[in-house]
Amino acid sequence: MDTGTHVVMGIALGGLAMADPVVASQPATMTAVFAGVIIGSQAPDIDTILKLRNNAVYIRHHRGATHSIPAVILWPLLITAALLFILPEANSLHLWLWTFLAVFLHVFVDIFNSYGTQALRPFSNRWVALGVINTFDPIIFGAHLIALMFWAFGSNPVWTMLILYGLLFFYYVARFAVQNAVKHAVRNTIPGTTNIIVAPTMRFFQWRIAADTDRHHYVGRAYGRSINIYDKFLKKPLPESNLIQAALKDKNLSAFVSFSPLYRWEINQYGDLYEVRLIDLRYRSNDYYPFVAVAHLNEQCKVVNSYTGWIFSEDKLRKKLDFSHN
C-alpha cells in the first residue's frame, strides 16, 4: 500500500490497542504502543531510500529483505528496544506484541497489491502478489479516515476499529470475487489463454488486463465483465545473440526482467548504436507503456547507457539516457 494508507492503518491500530487492558490502564505503555504501531506500520518501507541510488537497485530490492520473515521478527524488536530506552516504564511485552502486529499487517496488506512482496524470504524469493487491491485504494483509505474522524469526535475506538476492519474484510472478499469474474470473462473473450494478469485500478469495476496465448500477447481493460482488448502483439522469443546477452547483463535490464512477468521486446538501430527495449505489458496508460528498460549498445556489444523505470514520453526517456551517459 501507499505511505498514507499505512499511516492511517497505524493510527487505527493504536485505537484498537485500547482493547488491551494493560495499554488502556498504563499511560506510559499507551504512549509507547501508539508510537510503536505508527512506526511499525512504516518501518518495512525504509527500503524506499534505495531510490536515491538508482531505479535498478530499487526495483530489484523494494519490498524484498525489509518485508521478509526475518525482518518481520526484527523490526518489532528494534522498535521496542528504542521506545523502552525512551519510556522504560512501559510494559515491554505488550509494546512488542502491538508493534509486531503493526509490522505484520504492513507486510500482509502489501501482498494484496499487484506489486507484491518477497514475504516468504529466506525460504523463497518468489514475489507474492495477489493483485486485488490497488497500491492506493480510495475506499480503504477513506474508510480509515471516516473511522478516525468518529474516534476524534468521541466514539469508542475499539468498537469503531472493529467495525472498520469487519467491513474491510468483506470488501476484500468482494475484490477477490470481482477479480475471479474478470478472469473468467477474459478466458471467454480470449480462448486459449495460458497466463492472465488482472491488476486493480483505483476504480472498483475497472481492471488492467495482460494475457498470453501460445502465439500472442493481449493487453486491455475490464469494465465489470466487459473486456476491451486494446493491443495484440505476436509473441517472439528473445534472440540468442551477443547483443541480447550483453544487454541482459546490464543492471537496469536484469532488474526489469527480475520484476516483470510479462513483457515484449524491441531492437532498433540508430546510427552506430543498437537499442534494446523491454516493455512491461501490465501498465498501459493513454496508448503508452510507461514501464520500460532500455539499453544502448555499440557495435562491440558494450552498453553505452541504460535506464529502467516509469517514463511517459520518448523525450523524457532520451533525457534520462543522455544523463546516464554523461
Image (cartoon, rainbow, N blue to C red):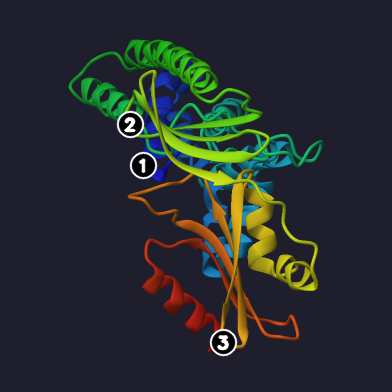
Does residue 148 show up?
Answer: yes
Q: Is residue 275 above or below residue 208?
A: below
Residue at 47% over, 76% down: 320
Q: Residue furthest left?
A: 153
Which label sits on residue 141? Answer: 2
Q: Pick whichever of labels 2 and 1 is earlier in the sequence.
A: 1
Of badges 1 and 3, the one in the foreground is: 3
- The Cα–Cα distance between marks 1 and 3, rounded to whole angstroms, is 47 Å
Q: In which image quadrant can residue 156 be found?
A: top left
Residue 271 % position (x, y): 56, 87
Residue sitting nearer the eye, 172 or 305: 305
**27 left or right of 93?**
left
Label 1 crowd (10 A; few <14 / some 14-19 / many >=20): few
Q: Pick whichever of labels 3 and 2 is earlier in the sequence.
A: 2
Residue at 54% over, 27% down: 98
Label 1: which residue?
4
Residue 7 % position (x, y): 39, 39
Label 3: which residue?
271
Does residue 31 show up?
Answer: no
Residue sitting nearer the eye, 318 or 88: 318
Residue at 43% over, 16% down: 178
Q: Could you say whether the residue bearing mark 2 is in a helix, strand or loop?
A: helix
Q: Pick whichever of labels 1 and 3 is earlier in the sequence.
A: 1
- The Cα–Cα distance between marks 2 and 1, rounded to whole angstroms, is 8 Å
